[in-house]
Image: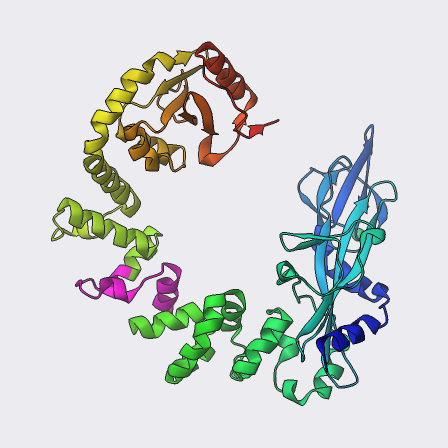
Amino acid sequence: MFKYEVRNQLIAIDELDTSIFSEMIDKMTLKNNKIILFHHGKKYKYFCTNCKTWHDCHHVKLKTKLKCENCNKTFEVICKRNVIRTCADFITYLQTDKENNMIIRSFFFKKKFNKEKMDFDINCFEIGRYNYDVDVGIVRYSYTSHYVVYFENEQYLEKWKKPSDSYEGVIEYINVYKKDINKIIRKRSDLKYSQLKKAIKYFDIVDYMNLYKRYNELELLFKFNCTNYIKSIAKSHIYNENFLLLLETNKKYIRYIVKYNLSAKEFEKMFELEIFDVEKVRMAAKYNVCKKDFVDSKININKLIMYLHQQKQQCNMYNDYLGLCNYLGVDMKKTKNMFPNNLKQAHDELSISKSNIDNKKYEKGFIENYMKNIKYMYCDKKYIVYPVENPHELIIESINNKNCVKSYIPKVDRGDCEIFLMREINKIDKSLVTIEIIDNELNQVKAFDNGKINQSEKKFIIHWCKKKNLEYRECADVKYD
Ligand SMILES: [Zn+2]
């Protein structure tokens, strides 16, 4: 059969009455319901959006949880001005055609609270039909972005068409309508042992069926309730590509997965590190201990795992620390250097020392630029802004303001850009805003963690630019509160 014929068959399928999904949508969105508190003078009452009933009550604190007297479900208490989040998600409906091919139909719904009606408006549309066995599909959508399908109004929906390349992966085959699933599995001998009904709880159904075609062992994982292993395969592309193979090559250890409900990562660590104490295995997985990093060193893996657990730090920080010790010639015979009391602090201190050594060569360029830019220093009653004087200042600014400005050191040295630090005069040592200027024009303005600046900071920057003849440009997000 030609692809266009399959498409025509898909188009010819009768529309489905989407009201069959009502109960399912309610279940999927149950957690998003609210208790809305109203008051008139000293009298209070609340409205439960789940069961849509009113109740008299005493004053209840907002943002706390309250159990609805009618439906017995617990929801967050909000006031009538608060906005209730609109919910949107996919629903997958399965059916078979005359040839017993699996037809997967995708629906998308939006559930929005309507304050006037005090009820939810639910919009549910079919957006895709896919013949799984011949791998041909059709789509119907108006606009897609970030894996979310938008449609506000039925009239905007386009007709069925062939999916474009950019549509690939937009639809998620999740939230399967379970009612007819047994019937479908019975019709398909290839799915008889697939554990499909259990699998759809964890997997996108198309992903799972593709995976099951390659690895029948999946059936065993479900049979023995290895939920953690199943979850890791479902969640991680790397695990579903490699770990079923690993499962095959390490068959003798499979009993541990069953016995301890190990995740794929824990399973990997068990035979990589040859540790069979399950508590340690779980810690090794949590802190990402890799044997290959320590092949040459005499570090006792068991001791290291306990150390990382006590420090609550990832193994790559420890590796980094060892590298810094080596670079700076730290005496590793001393236990306090091998396993410092505070790994993070020891790591950061050495990291600054190394940067300072590395950045010695930039100091001259920095001073030259500083002398050139000092004329742009400016302050008012609250803020001050000044050029950086040495590379060390940028390293500290990077750490304190959580940004990557230290990577600008070579650029500043060459005079390709100028970095200015804006601080509050009363807290001159505390990083506030990091500013980059290129060719007398504002290029980047970043608050903590590359975040937004506030109104008063913006005002100061505008003043500064005006006074010092710098080109002001709208390049920072501003916080409006
Ligand atoms: Zn209720």
Q: In which quarter of the image is residue 279?
A: bottom left
In the picture, measured across the screen, residue 8 lies left or right of residue 366, that is right
In the picture, measured across the screen, residue 480 lies left or right of residue 415, that is right
Q: Determine the residue positioned at 45% across, 22% down.
A: 441
Compared with residue 402, is residue 393 higher up or lower down, i.e. above or below?
Answer: above
Q: Which quarter of the image is occupied by the N terminus? A: bottom right
In the picture as drawn, the residue positioned furthest to the bottom comes out as 189
Tally of numbered discs:
0
Q: Residue 132 placed where, x, y %? A: 67, 76
Q: Residue 287 placed where, x, y %? A: 36, 58
Q: Does the magenta stretch include residue 287?
A: yes
- Does residue 42 appear anywhere in the picture? yes
In the picture, measured across the screen, residue 94 lies left or right of residue 199, that is right
Q: Determine the residue positioned at 29% across, 21% down.
A: 369
Q: Residue 400 placed where, x, y %? A: 37, 33
Compared with residue 241, is residue 420 higher up or lower down, i.e. above or below?
Answer: above
- Does residue 222 appear anywhere in the picture? no
Q: Magenta region: which residues?
A: 275-304
Q: Does the magenta stretch include residue 239?
A: no
Q: Residue 452 placed where, x, y %? A: 53, 31
Q: Which quarter of the image is occupied by the C terminus? A: top right
In the picture, measured across the screen, residue 273 lies left or right of residue 452, that is left
